[in-house]
Each structure stands twice: as structure tokens, then as C-alpha cells.
Amino acid sequence: MSRNIVPFEKKVWLATPRMHGEEEQFIHDAFAKNWVTTIGENIDELEKNFTEYLGCRYAVGLSSGTSAIHLAVKLAGIGPGDYVLCSDMTFSATVNPVAYEKGTAVFVDSEYDTWNMDPEALRKAFALYPQAKAAIVANLYGTPAKLDEIKEICDEYNAVLIEDAAESLGAVYKGKMTGSFGRYNIISFNGNKIITCSTGGMLLTDDEEAAKKVRKWSTQARDAAPWYQHTELGYNYRMSNIIAGVGRGQFLHLQEHLDMKKAIYERYREGLKDLPVQMNPYIEEDMTPNYWLSCLIIDEDAMCEQTRDDHTPHYVHEYGKSCPTEILETLMKYNAEGRPIWKPMHMQPIYKDNPHVQVREHSVGEDVFRRGLCLPTDINMTPEEQDIIIQIIHMCFDK
Ligand SMILES: *Cc1c(COP(=O)(O)O)cnc(C)c1O
């Protein structure tokens, strides 16, 4: 392994947008027709693209994935005193909308197979909170959760399943697209997702009444009256026809992005196979991930000493061993961006009093957070740049 690695002149990012040209044409079209608002052909067409692609009957374009989750939580009827069983290891946007509605999120531990919500832990959570009205499951880093088992358990308890497919657009579970398993499903078009509108999101469902409510709530909940009349609380959550134009252009290149993400994952898997690490796992027979982020987890016996309090990480390097903090700091030194694994919600100061359910003696989420990290997975990164990233990771274990 060469030790003469010099820092990247141009930063290697975690995940950045990749534009193709059509995006600008659709924006231009919105300008030309003067639909510079939250109505127009770009929104209609983008919604149509996704009902067809995901196999859901209705889609509503919204201002973000978070606003889509918020409206899904409202559709599920969550209010003060209601429990919602949520993925523990995820981005805070998965669970914050429960708090917006004054419900109580119960955090359900992850499993090692997929890093997603453990169906067994979900079953235990329902046994403890049988009155829970809904569950929100996230497909982390583009790997599907065991969605059929999770759906079955929710059905058993008459709870609404909300699927947070913000990270997993294009991923398939047992022949069916993620983002189509829940009663309400959400996707995100944030700038670092597999395709982007710059910002934006969408709610998908087969329930026509629900889709109508989302359209109404997202545009200030106006009643059908000759003046501004409101019987329900409204929001300004609708997608703009301009950003929908970006999405329409991006949609044409979704498959290309999926292929590039997969190639990055496989290059890492090959390049890191001699190290005591594993790539983020999935179940090959059942799943085609979208490989949104390539992650790795360090074998327990190859972990050097690492401590993390609420703000500052520390580590002590050791020959043949490493830890996420060391790898992330080293990547940064060479001008490349990795990220820690999502810090589980039960470890977050804001959610320290919420219930947390696990089936093992230790929390799987805590363990993955401690030993795992996200690698630069930018589709604008070249294979040569990725090879240097792989060398840098080797260096962390060598010295
Ligand atoms: C990005 C993301 C969201 C939120 O989407 P925004 O469009 O950024 O609001 C929600 N859940 C998960 C798991 C995400 O990664």
C-alpha cells in the first residue's frame, strides 16, 4: 500500500447531486408557461412517474420528505397520548413528526441482518404497547427492512404502517418496490438522495380519500367555499412546479444512478475484503438495495479504543485495528467526507425519556453506531478517487 497519498485537491463528498440537462429543460418549460407556482405540468407528471414506478395508486408532491411524514402521521390520526413504534436507528426526520402531533415515539431496535427495524423487537413493542396506532419503518441507506414481516405484525395489531423510503427509492423487496408497502409511504428528493429536486418529497398511497386529504392539508386546508373558509388546520407543504421540473429530469436517470451506486458498493466490497470489516448487510435472496450509501462495520476484535460523549469523540490508535472516529478523521484529513451511522434515537438527548424496546441484551443500534460508518458514496466520484479512499482506510488499520 502506498504511503504517499496526498489530500484530494477537489473534495470527495458523501453524496452530491448529479444533473443531466433535462432538469433545466423542464424548469424552462415551467417558466415559458408561467406556471411558477405550486400547480403545473411538472408536478402532475412527476406524481404520475412515481405512481407508475412504485405501483401506488396516488402520489402527492410535497415540499420535503419530512412534511410527507408529518402528513402521514396526521393521516394515521396520531395525537396526544398515542404511541407510534418507530425505527430507533434512523435520521431524526423519521420520528420528529410524531412529536409535532404530541404523540409518543417508541424506539424499536435494529437487527444485524439489514440494520433496519427488527421484526422481533417490533413484536415485543406491540406486546408492551398493544394500543399503538402506527409504526414508522425506515429503509436505511437504501436497504429494505423485512417489510412483509413488519406489515404482517402491524396488521395483526390493526396499526397503520408508514414506510419511510426516503433513502431507498428504487430498492426492491421480494419483487416489490420499497415505498409501496405501507398504507402511507414517503420518499424524499433532498439534495443528497439518489435523485433530487434540490428539496422535496412525496406521499404515496392506494387510499384515494387519504390522498385527497393530503392535497387539501398541504395547501392550507381550504374548504370548498366562495371565500377562505377552514374547518381543518392547514399547512403550506405543497411541492413547487419549478423543483418538480428538476425531479422530472432526474427521474429519467434514476436507473443510471442506481447502477452507479451499486458499482461503488461493489468496488468497496472488493477493495476492503482483506480488512476486518463488513459492508452494510442485506439479504441477497429477498432484496435489491439501491446502495444509496456504502457503509462499513468494523469487526469487534478489530476495534481500537474509542469513546464518544454527546459532543466529542476520542480514540487511541492501535496496529491492525481502527474505529469509525479514526477513519472519519483520516478521511477528513485527506479532504474526503464520510459520516457516522445515524445515532440511534434512544441515545438522543431530545428523546432520552421515550420508551425503547430491544430483544437482545445489548442494543443493536448502539453497536452499529459504535462500529459503523458511511463511506463517500458520491456518484460523481471517479473509480481512481475511490481507490484512494480504499487505500486511506487500509492505512487506518496499518499504522
Ligand atoms: C432524508 C430523510 C428524511 C427526510 O427527508 P427530507 O426531504 O430531507 O425532509 C426522512 N427520513 C430519512 C430516513 C431520511 O434519510
Image (cartoon, grey):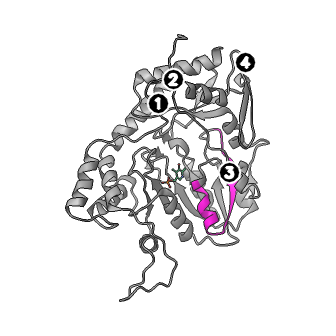
Q: Is mark 4 within 8 Å of ligand 1?
A: no
- Which residue was labeled with disc 3? 345
Give the residue displayed 49% in from the left and 75% down from the top: 234
- Which residue was labeled with disc 1? 12
Q: Earlier in the sequence, mark 3 or mark 1?
A: 1
Residue 283 position within the rendered picture, expressed as x and y whole percent measured from the top left: 55, 37
Give the residue displayed 45% in from the left and 75% down from the top: 220
Q: Earlier in the sequence, mark 3 or mark 2?
A: 3
Q: Earlier in the sequence, mark 4 or mark 2?
A: 4
Q: Nearer the viewer, mark 1 or mark 4?
A: 1
Identify the mark at residue 36; answer none if there is no mark.
none
For the residues labelled 3 and 1, the Cα–Cα distance comes to 28 Å
Q: Residues within 10 Å of mark 3 (few under 14, many from 20)?
A: many
Q: Residues within 10 Å of mark 4 (few under 14, many from 20)?
A: some
**Name of the residue lying farthest toward the front:** 9
Task: Please state which amino acid type lies under the numbered disc 1.
Answer: Val
For the residues labelled 4 and 2, the Cα–Cα distance comes to 20 Å
Q: Are marks 1 and 4 in contact (CB under 8 Å)?
A: no
Badge 4 marks a residue whose secondary structure is loop
Image label count: 4
